[in-house]
Amino acid sequence: MKKQRLYIAYAAAVLSATTLVSSCSKILDLEPHNSTFTGAYFSSESDAKTSLSGAYAILRNILIRDNSWHKYGDVVSGELSIDGGRDNGNYNISNGEYTGLNVGSSNWNWQQYYQLLQQVNLIINKVPGIPDSKFASIDTKRHVIGEAYFLRAFTYFYMSRIWGDVPLKLQPDLDVSTAKNIARSPAADVWKQCLADLEAAKPNLDFGYEGNETDRAVRANKGSAFALQAHILAWKGDYAGAADAANTVITSGGYLLADASNYAKVFIGKSQEGIFEININDAQSEGLSLQNNSGMGVTLSMPFIDGKSYIEWPVNTNMVNYLYADSSIDIRYRTFFYNAQSNQGQIIKFANITYADGSTKKDPRLSNNLIIFRLADIILLRAEMLNKLGQDGDALTLLNKIRKRAGLADVSDTGADLETAILEERLRELYFEGHAYYDLVRTKKLPDYNEHFPSAQFQGGAPTGGWLWPIDPGMFKDDYTLVQTPYWRGKL
């Protein structure tokens, strides 16, 4: 059996979240189970909950593996001055060089995403058929279904911002003998499906967490669905729709901006500001190991990681000085950075480090959640949309709310000046949170802020623009439906 096939039915549904995280490499070697097995497995509340935990675990592994969330969302934005002597591959990527000897093909390969989608499609296909009587509460059943639809929408939207057109697979492969490869679907069709999935998710989800604070932000809820919808509609250019979705998050989600004195706690996770996050909690034995400089340890050294005297991803001092011109009063400057004026400047918003062996400070562990969506992001996104709609007064109110929290004075810009002010506030507020590259691409401003990204490569827009990533030529071996991302044809 050829294990390179894109759509193999994995047995992920029967594995616990812990197993999925710690043994992901083994999943790729699992033989598929047939429809009889999956039909027998999805028969109880425990089955439904375990399968959903497995989906979250696969997503977690995807986003933290090889710093993927930050690699795709931050490395190419201009935020960093990557040390080419210590991380040559990401140094090249930061300059828009998505191919070459030092850029691994793992950056081009989307097979692990379809592993997640197989898991989610199984949940969507099977859990509705589990009798309601098998659940202690029908709310549990509908939440599992709603979260699965959210995860599918998030996964496809995330993929589309990396590769543009992607194969749209909406049914699980219950029997490998009938599995088929399918062609890439246009990004517009992918986004349409994402929005449809969110409409299916919303009635099954609730705002809040019903008193279960352990789930705060790390389990998707209705606020997460509206936040994702706002981002998708912004990419589609539906400014009114995006503004409305963002407004629902702001007014109905129950989220609160952290005050200035507690701002740093937002990045530990599960704050009132958090909308959707990936759990990385050392207290729950999930802390991300920083051994071998994995995880977000690439931006940290002493005094945050004991004994480490260098960093692979120093901050871009020029970018910091431009964005944080009011560094003496902007609380984000001292909360986000350490020694930013040196060539070893550190991004420290994710610097909650513990040690597995505390007595000798061995095996450092990161205990900051990976922040995907938070309230400040959605407030600024709505401000951007209102500016596009000519509602500058309301946009200014939202923009200045974020500035006030940071300790900055109000601005009174309008029109194009306000558009720039909002974009740069997003760059300040969300520095190294996986948004900068996508914001600069979406607003067509990438070469203006990352001078090292070739303007000619950026031109053309989707699907021809070189800001999209190529796909791994190795995936063509057993899938003749695939075609290369247009800009990269003949370049690999």
Image: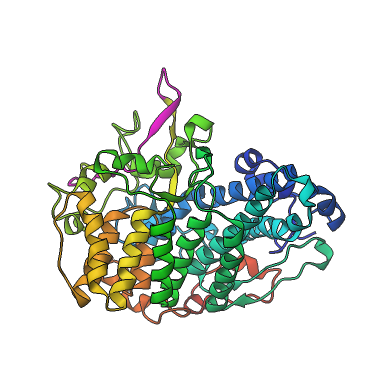
Q: Nearer the viewer, residue 64 or 283?
A: 283
Q: Provide residue 342's location: percent of width, then percent of height.
A: 19, 45
Q: Provide residue 106's location: percent of width, then percent of height.
A: 54, 57
Q: Which residues are magenta?
A: 340-361
In the rendered view, does 414 fall on the left or right side of 279? left
In the rendered view, does 229 fall on the left or right side of 144? left
- Image quarter (top left, top right, bottom left or bottom right) of the N terminus: bottom right
Residue 7 included in the magenta stretch of the image: no
- Above or below for 58 versus 231: above
In the rendered view, does 415 fall on the left or right side of 293? left
Q: Nearer the viewer, residue 154 or 187?
A: 154
- Above or below for 230 versus 359: below
Answer yes or no: is residue 95 visible.
no
Magenta highlight: main SS: loop
Q: Provide residue 371's location: percent of width, then percent of height.
A: 42, 49
Residue 350 included in the magenta stretch of the image: yes
Outermost top residue: 359
Residue depicted at 41% across the width and 17% down the height: 359
Outermost right residue: 36
Residue depicted at 54% across the width and 48% down the height: 219
Q: Nearer the viewer, residue 363 or 175?
A: 175
